[in-house]
Image (spheres, grey):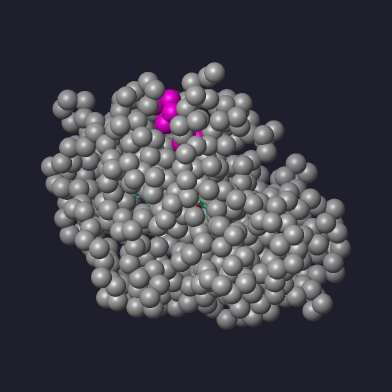
C-alpha cells in the first residue's frame, strides 16, 4: 500500500460539523456587532510571538494545511486579513443578500462593483460605507478579480460548484503531478473533506427553483451539447427543506455573493471546524501579512498589520515562525512573493515568481428567451449543471442563476474556457504596488469558445444574446474573473510539492500553484493538490 493510500484512511475523516461557535477571531465587527453579544474571542497573535507554523490566509489551501499539520501534532497559527463573520448585523443575519448589498458586502469600497452591473438599462451599483466586507472586487488594469475576504476565504462567497476535472484532461492542468495518485487518493479525500453532495435528479426535474437550469438543459440538448450535473457543497437536503418551507431560506433567497446564512458547507463547517477541534489551530482575523524575511535560527520574521473595520492599521506586529505557508490565494500569494523578491526581503526566490497567471478562461453572457420559456421567479443561487463543449470548442458553461426575484426570461451562463493567455505580476516600485499585465483583449479566445455553444443555441432556438447585463449594448462579461489561478506555479516557482526555491521552510499551498486553468471550477482541484502536497511535506519536512 502506498504512503498516500495509507494516509487516506486517516484523512478522509472530515465530517459535517456545526458552525464554529465564535471562531478564534479578534476584532469586534464594529457596527455589525450591535445587535448580538459576541462571545469573548481568544487573543490575536501577539507582537514578538514565535509559532512553529504560520499560515497566511484561511481559504482552501490554508485550511487543508492547517488541519493536516494539526492532526500531525503541529501547532499552527493562521493569519487572515478579512473578518471572522460570526456576528449578525442589524437585520439579525450574518451575511447580506445578493439583491441588497450593504456595508457587509464589499472589501474597502465606497461603491459596490457588482459582477452584473446593469439590468434592463439601469445601472445596479450603489454607494456603501467603506468596510472590510466579504467580497473583494480587486481592480487591475485589464481585469477585475473577485475574491472572498474573511475566515474561510473564497468558500464564503462562491457558488459551491465542486467539480473534479475529467481525468483525461488532468495532464493538461498539472502536468508534473501523478494523475493516478490524484484520482485514487487526493480528489476523493478533497471531496470527502469538503462535504461535496449531489442533487437528487428526480427533485431537480420537478422543483421550481431549478426551472432555469432545466431550460438551460433543454436548450443545450436540443443543440446537441451534453448537459452534466455538477456536485456542490451546498447541502441539497437543506435546500429541499427550503423549497418545502420548513427552514429559513438561503439558496432560495438569493444568498451567494455576499455569503450564505444557511445550507452552504463553507470551510467554516468542514476543514476549519475540524482544524479548530484539534485544539492546535488559532486564527487571527483582520490581520494582514505584509512582509516575510529570513531571521536567525532558520526562522522567518513575519510582519503583520492588524486592521480595523475601515481598513486602517491599528497595530504592526513582528512574529517569528519556523515555517510559513503562503495560502493568500492566487492573487494574494503572488502579490506578496513578487514584492518580497523585488524588495530583497526574500532575495533567493526564482524568476518564475509572478508568472503563469490565468483567469480560468472566465467569461459571462446572458440569452434572451422566448416568452414561452420562463426561467422562474425563484432560482436557487447554487448552480447545479453545466454544458460541456470542452473537447470540441474549449468551453464548459455553467448554467448560472439570475435570482432577481422576478421573471427575467433570461438564461445566464458563466463559461470556463480554454484561453492560452497568461499574465505576469510585477513590482511597481514607483507606485509601491504589484501590477498585473492582463489585457481585456486577451478574453477574445474565451468569447470565441463560449460562442461555439451559444451561437448554436441561439440559432437553434431563434433567440438572441442579452445586451443589458454588463453595460449598455454589451454582450460579454469579459472584464472579470472569479477564478484567479497561478503566479507561483508548481514545479516552476516551487518544487513539485510547493516548496519555494531558495528559502527552505517557505511553501505555497493555494491556487497560485495552478498554471492558469483547471477546465472546470477550481476549488476541488486546489483542495486536492493541497492535500497531496501537505501529505508529502509532513512526511519529509516535519
Ligand atoms: P482563497 O480561498 O482566495 O483564500 C485566500 C485567503 O487569504 C482569503 O481569505 C484572503 O482574504 C486571505 N489573504 C489574502 N492576502 C492576505 C494577506 N496578505 N494576509 C492575510 N490574509 C490574506 O484562496 N470555485 C469553484 O470551484 N466553484 C464555484 O462555484 C466557485 N464560485 C465562485 C464564485 C465567486 C463569486 C468567487 C469570487 C469565486 C468562486 N470560485 C468558485 C473560486 C474559488 O472560491 C477560489 O478558486 C478559491 O477560493 C481559491 O482558494 P485559495 O485557497 O487559493
Is 112 located above or below residue 233 in the figure? below
Residue 106 place in picture, x, y as percent: 40, 67
Is 389 located above or below residue 208 in the figure? above
Judged by its main secondary structure, the magenta piece is helix
Residue 371 place in picture, x, y as percent: 79, 79
Q: Is residue 164 visible?
A: yes
Is 152 located above or below residue 501 in the figure? below
**Quarter occupied by residue 472:** bottom right
The residue most toward the front is 246
**Quarter occupied by residue 384:** bottom right
Specify start and end residues of the magenta stretch as a single range. Answer: 529-537
| Residue at (62% x, 65% y) in the render | 240
Q: Is residue 344 visible?
A: no
Location of the C terminus by quadrant is top left
| Residue at (27% x, 53% y) in the render | 24
Is 236 placed left or right of 499 in the picture? right
Is 28 placed left or right of 251 in the picture? left
Say which of 117 and 237 sits in front: 237
Residue 20 place in picture, x, y as percent: 36, 55
Say which of 223 and 446 sits in front: 223
Is 428 placed left or right of 457 in the picture? left
Amino acid at each position: 500500500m502506498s504512503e498516500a493510500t495509507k494516509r487516506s484512511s486517516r484523512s478522509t475523516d472530515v465530517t459535517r460539523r456545526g458552525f464554529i461557535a465564535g471562531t478564534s477571531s479578534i476584532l469586534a465587527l464594529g457596527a455589525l456587532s450591535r445587535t448580538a453579544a459576541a462571545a469573548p474571542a481568544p487573543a490575536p497573535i501577539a507582537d514578538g510571538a514565535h509559532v512553529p507554523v504560520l499560515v497566511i490566509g484561511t481559504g482552501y489551501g490554508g485550511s487543508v494545511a492547517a488541519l493536516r499539520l494539526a492532526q500531525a501534532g503541529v501547532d499552527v497559527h493562521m493569519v487572515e486579513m478579512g473578518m471572522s463573520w460570526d456576528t449578525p448585523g442589524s437585520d439579525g443575519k450574518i451575511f447580506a443578500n445578493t439583491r441588497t448589498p450593504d456595508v457587509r458586502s464589499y472589501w474597502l469600497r465606497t461603491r459596490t462593483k457588482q459582477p452584473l452591473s446593469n439590468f434592463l438599462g439601469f445601472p445596479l451599483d450603489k454607494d456603501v460605507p467603506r468596510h472590510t466586507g466579504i467580497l473583494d472586487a480587486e481592480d487591475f488594469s485589464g481585469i477585475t478579480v473577485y475574491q472572498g475576504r474573511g475566515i474561510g476565504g473564497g468558500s464564503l462567497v462562491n457558488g459551491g460548484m465542486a467539480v473534479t476535472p475529467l481525468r483525461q484532461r488532468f495532464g493538461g492542468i498539472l502536468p508534473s503531478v501523478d494523475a493516478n495518485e490524484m484520482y485514487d487518493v487526493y480528489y476523493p479525500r478533497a471531496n470527502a473533506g469538503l462535504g461535496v453532495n449531489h442533487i437528487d435528479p428526480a427533485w431537480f426535474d420537478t422543483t421550481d427553483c431549478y426551472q432555469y437550469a432545466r431550460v438551460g438543459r433543454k436548450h443545450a440538448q436540443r443543440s446537441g451539447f451534453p448537459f452534466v450535473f455538477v456536485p456542490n457543497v451546498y447541502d441539497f437536503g437543506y435546500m429541499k427543506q427550503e423549497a418545502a418551507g420548513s427552514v429559513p431560506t438561503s439558496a432560495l433567497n438569493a444568498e451567494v455573493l455576499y455569503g450564505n446564512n444557511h445550507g452552504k458547507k463553507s470551510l467554516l463547517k468542514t476543514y476549519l471546524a475540524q482544524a479548530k477541534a484539534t485544539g492546535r489551530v488559532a486564527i487571527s482575523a483582520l490581520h494582514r501579512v505584509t512582509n516575510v524575511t529570513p531571521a536567525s535560527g532558520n526562522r522567518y520574521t513575519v510582519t503583520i498589520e492588524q486592521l480595523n473595520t475601515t481598513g486602517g492599521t491599528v497595530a504592526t506586529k513582528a512574529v517569528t515562525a519556523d515555517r510559513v505557508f503562503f495560502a493568500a490565494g492566487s492573487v494574494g500569494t503572488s502579490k506578496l512573493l513578487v514584492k518580497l523578491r523585488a524588495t530583497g526581503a526574500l532575495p533567493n526566490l526564482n524568476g518564475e515568481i509572478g508568472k503563469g497567471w490565468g483567469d480560468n478562461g472566465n467569461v459571462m453572457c446572458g440569452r434572451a428567451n422566448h416568452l414561452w420559456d420562463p426561467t422562474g421567479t425563484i432560482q436557487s443561487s447554487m448552480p447545479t449543471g453545466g454544458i460541456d463543449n470542452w473537447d470540441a470548442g474549449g468551453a464548459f458553461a455553467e448554467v448560472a442563476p439570475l435570482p432577481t426575484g422576478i421573471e427575467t426570461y433570461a438564461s445566464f451562463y458563466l463559461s470556463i474556457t480554454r484561453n492560452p493567455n497568461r499574465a505576469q505580476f510585477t513590482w511597481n516600485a514607483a507606485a509601491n504596488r504589484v501590477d498585473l499585465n492582463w489585457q481585456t483583449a486577451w478574453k477574445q479566445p474565451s468569447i470565441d469558445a463560449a460562442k461555439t455553444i451559444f451561437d448554436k443555441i441561439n440559432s437553434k432556438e431563434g433567440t438572441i444574446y442579452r445586451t443589458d447585463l454588463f453595460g449598455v449594448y454589451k454582450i460579454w462579461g469579459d472584464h472579470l474573473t472569479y477564478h484567479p489561478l497561478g503566479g507561483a506555479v508548481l514545479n516552476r516557482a516551487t518544487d513539485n510539492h510547493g516548496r519555494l526555491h531558495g528559502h527552505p521552510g517557505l511553501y505555497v499551498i493555494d491556487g497560485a500553484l495552478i498554471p492558469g486553468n483547471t477546465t472546470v471550477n477550481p476549488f476541488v482541484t486546489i483542495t486536492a493538490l493541497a492535500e497531496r502536497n501537505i501529505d508529502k511535506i509532513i512526511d519529509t519536512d516535519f
